[in-house]
Image (cartoon, helix red, strand yellow):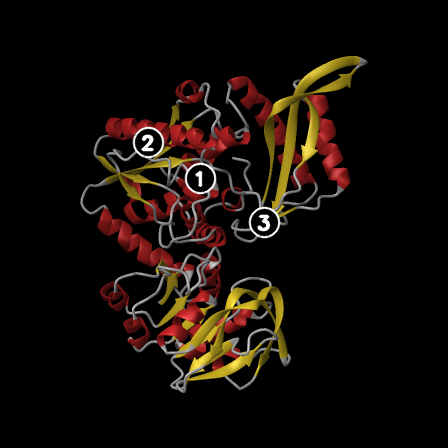
Amino acid sequence: MILILDFGSQYTQLIARRVREAHVYCEIHPYNLPLDRIRALAPKGIILSGGPASLYERDAPNIERAVLELGCPVLGICYGMYVIAQHLGARSAGTAHREYGPAILTVDRPDELFEGLTGSDHLVWMSHGDRVENLPSDLCAIAHSANSPYAAFRSVDGRLRGIQFHPEVVHTPQGATILGNFVHRICKEPGDWTMANFIETKVAEIHRATAGEGRVVMGLSGGVDSSVAAALIHKAIGDRLHCVFVDTALLRAGERQRMEKVFAGQLGIPLTVVDASELFLQRLAGVTDPEHKRRVIGHTFVEVFERQAAALGGARFLGQGTLYPDVIESVSFKGPSATIKSHHNVGGLPETMRLELIEPLRELFKDEVRELGRQLGLPPEIVDREPFPGPGLAIRIIGEVTRERLDLLRRADQIVIEETQAAGLNNRLWQSFAVLLPIKSVGVMGDGRTYESVLAIRAVESSDGMTADWARLDPAVLARMSSRITNEIKGINRVVYDITSKPPGTIEWE
């Protein structure tokens, strides 16, 4: 495996994605992971991520020198490069010639890291204010840019390398090749980690964790993540898994019927449907703060699950479909990345929860989960569905959640789904959905004045959900959506389109 030590870069998870795409298993841990833990992991290589700090700040994050002396190759990216340089005696300094954005990298001497790159000068993505000013005798330069004389270096023995730029982002077109060279050519990883390997490993882990008669109760939301997690747990423990589908009143149209058909019908996985809609609506009455909504929903989910587990008898575990992006956005799970928002799967769980968690997908990205679902035999209508938030439509209603507002949003959202499918946009879009706003506007219908709700349509393109761009939809498609919503749904008289990317916004509004 490849160990990634995180110094807080928002790009760290992208490094993991690129390594996984090279069919090499990797794990992300904080930069200050104890040395004995690193030795126990026995990595074939270590990558030091970038980060927002400067080495000249007080208490700047750093590693023990012994990490560089473990004998395996080490690659430092941006801040990670300065860490290596400092430990080996190179001098770094802040510079007025900062580089943010595209730059041209010129390779000065052949190196395995750059083998197979096309052209002599290479477009890369820079994001730094410091730079290495000189190198000691045991380091040698291998590339430069206009503002960085040592934009890449290696140690004389070839074990340590540092690069100023970010190969993990799409703005470095040949970055995947560079990272592939590090893991394959330099670390000698064969690239044989696959979803089949993951299934085998996780099935064994789940079986060990639930040894004996331990039963698992699994909450299904109707989305890809919980469905794939349930199928994986069922493969490990069979009918000791009992899935619970909670009708929260926060679901998309037809969700309950779809899940009953697929799980109880096609897959033969035991499924109990619990109607808790009134309970959720009571708990959400008067709640308008989005973080409060998520906590209320998360706590209520667990309460319902624990009650159902008690009714089933013998359930000790709660299965969840938590993914790595959920964790990164919720808490500093394996590094000091900034908290963006809590997910009900992660930040919304009560501290006193009696069930033990099983989260078999916690280290996977969405595309990996879809591939896992295909290998587990889940049908396309489950595996290829767009992401749907665990808190459901509650966080797509800005302001208070009521049954009436949910009905409005559900009908509008269904129209967005139908028109997106009719336009053949399913494979292009990461998500498309409707958001009900807490404002009303004046309109005119049938020569009469209306004063009704405003609805926003959101459609984004993305590869992993960590960054996203608003979709440039055909105006004719938007026109059909708007026309149908305002004509078919009494209570909405204005439709707007969200043209915000992530960042600066998030995909969901709350």
Name the residue type under label 1.
Gln
Residue furthest right in the image:
447
Pinpoint residue 6: horizontal percent, then vertical percent. Answer: 39, 60
Mark 2 to mark 1: distance in Å? 27 Å
In what element is the residue under mark 3?
loop
Name the residue type under label 2.
Val
Q: Earlier in the sequence, mark 2 or mark 3?
A: 2
Camera-nearest residue between 19 and 288: 288
Mark 3 to mark 1: distance in Å? 34 Å
Q: Quadrant of the N terminus?
A: bottom left
Q: Where residue 302 is drawn, which disc sits there? A: 2
Q: Earlier in the sequence, mark 3 or mark 1?
A: 1
Q: Quadrant of residue 75?
A: bottom left
Camera-nearest residue between 146 and 306: 146
Front: mark 3 or 1: 3
What residue is shown with label 3? Answer: 468
Pinpoint residue 345: horizontal percent, then vertical percent. Answer: 38, 39
Residue furthest top in the image:
448
What residue is shown with label 1? Answer: 266
In what element is the residue under mark 1?
helix
156 relative to 50, above or below: below
The answer to whether the residue labelled 2 contacts the one labelled 3, judged by CB atoms less than 8 Å apart, is no
Q: Earlier in the sequence, mark 2 or mark 1?
A: 1
